[in-house]
Amino acid sequence: MEMESISVSNTTASTETSERLVLLIAHNKAEQDLCRNAILAQSQLYGVETATNAEEALAKLQTGRFDVIVMDYELPDNINGELVQTLHKAVPHCPMIVITSVDSPELALKILLSGASDYLPKITEYQKFLPRSITTNLQRAMLLENLRETYQRVEQSSKDEALLNRLIVSIHGSLDLEDIVDKAVQSLSGEFKISRAIICLTSDPTSSMRIVRQLTPEGVDAISEKSSLFSQYHDLLLDVGERRPLVVMQDDTFAFAKDVRAELIQFQILSMIMVPLVYRGRLMGLLHLDQCDYARCWTVGEINLLTRIANQLSIAISQARLYQIVETQSTSIDKLTELCSQLSTVVNSTREITERNESREKVRVQLSTREIEVLRNVAAGLSNREIAETLHITEGTTEVHVSRLRKKLNLGSRAALVRYAYENHLC
């Protein structure tokens, strides 16, 4: 009894100081002790907690503290191996090592397909291989997690670029100020799923902010331009060093949030973000987005994207204002024609750049990086052998890529691939 107490005490201490925590699920006390001692003897970085059945294991997994699972396949409640699937569904990214007395390729395949990451037969002194298996599977899990995070970042970046391109096409396609701000709030409201989208402009940096466009869904009250929300933020923006996005939650306690809390409550704003509109150092207005149905936490990625959108909106507004000045004040027909031509050139150039970027983005989403490289080389007139040498791949692989390109793009010939590459600005 005393020895058992000491063992439990040591296990508890190890889990408190360990960097990696193992959940050992085994109903046989002797095998449980054998595996636990082998793991603890390998490294002080490991801690071990034990469970003797499925119910106890699932309860412990709910804490989210475990880095790896070691499970005995011969558990009485592991009916037809269903426990492996259950554990995998509970913690899909946690590596699971299954030990079993049956050394069978068919069983190993079944276990791995059920969600386990490794399989260890109970051959003589099998416990000695357990620590190495744990280390290997932990390293593999970390690598997979890094790959998932990288993929998510790349995917989000691609979505952000596509969203930005859509907005650029929308707002740079006109020189009419009302049309620009109307398209901007419509696009922002749809893309970000917000409660209100407001654009305020000022004739000069020291003048008060004026709401030029406000979009609110049914059931949400409009905000008056006399609201202190805009005047308070405008006061901050007069300091050039403070010209940055401002995120406010209704329960925030910093000075600005306290000053406008009554307004936030009045208009049922749970969270909001305001972004300055600045062109060539000149304050032109602000962009306001808020959420009334839940306390939205604006991510760094969303804030950066809104800043880029605000920059493009500032350029479009500046161009529209310049166009208005030219229309109303110019008395020289020649000068008016020249300036309008210059502005049209700017708009057309911006549209062409945007369309080119959209075209490239469309191709990049549809094709893999390797397929784009092969397509560019095909457009350059290289043969399959030359492409293979350039990309350090086999000629057979090159032929497969070219065949897939024709199938994906629904093109019947190599010449059609060349034309497609040039039309989509890949050369």
Image (spheres, helix red, strand yellow):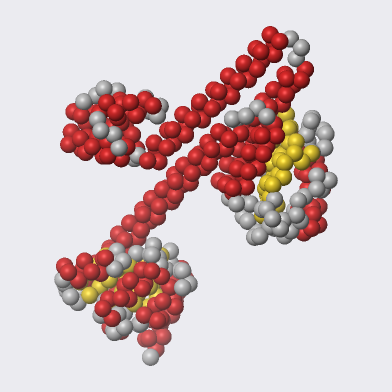
User: Is 286 located above or below residue 48 in the figure?
Assistant: above
Residue 389 in view here: no
Q: Toward which corner of the image does residue 122 lie, by quadrant?
A: bottom left
Q: Is residue 266 left or right of residue 31?
A: right
Residue 401 coordinates in the image, percent (x, y): 25, 37
Residue 171 in view here: yes
Q: Nearer the viewer, residue 167 or 58?
A: 167
**Looking at the rendering, in which quadrant would you find the C terminus?**
top left
Q: Nearer the viewer, residue 422 or 72?
A: 422
Residue 221 coordinates in the image, percent (x, y): 75, 54
Q: Nearer the viewer, residue 248 or 355?
A: 355
User: Is 252 located above or below residue 166 in the figure?
Assistant: below
Q: Residue at x 44, y 33 (%)?
A: 359
Q: Toward which corner of the image does residue 188 lie, by quadrant?
A: top right
Residue 36 coordinates in the image, percent (x, y): 32, 75
Q: Toward which corner of the image does residue 414 lie, by quadrant?
A: top left
Q: Residue at x 66, y 13 (%)?
A: 337
Q: Residue at x 79, y 58 (%)?
A: 266
Q: How many marks?
A: 0
Looking at the image, which residue sits at the far bottom? 1
Residue 167 coordinates in the image, percent (x, y): 57, 37
Q: Residue at x 28, y 81 (%)?
A: 79
User: Is 272 located above or below residue 2 in the figure?
Assistant: above
**Looking at the rendering, in which quadrant would you find the N terminus?**
bottom left
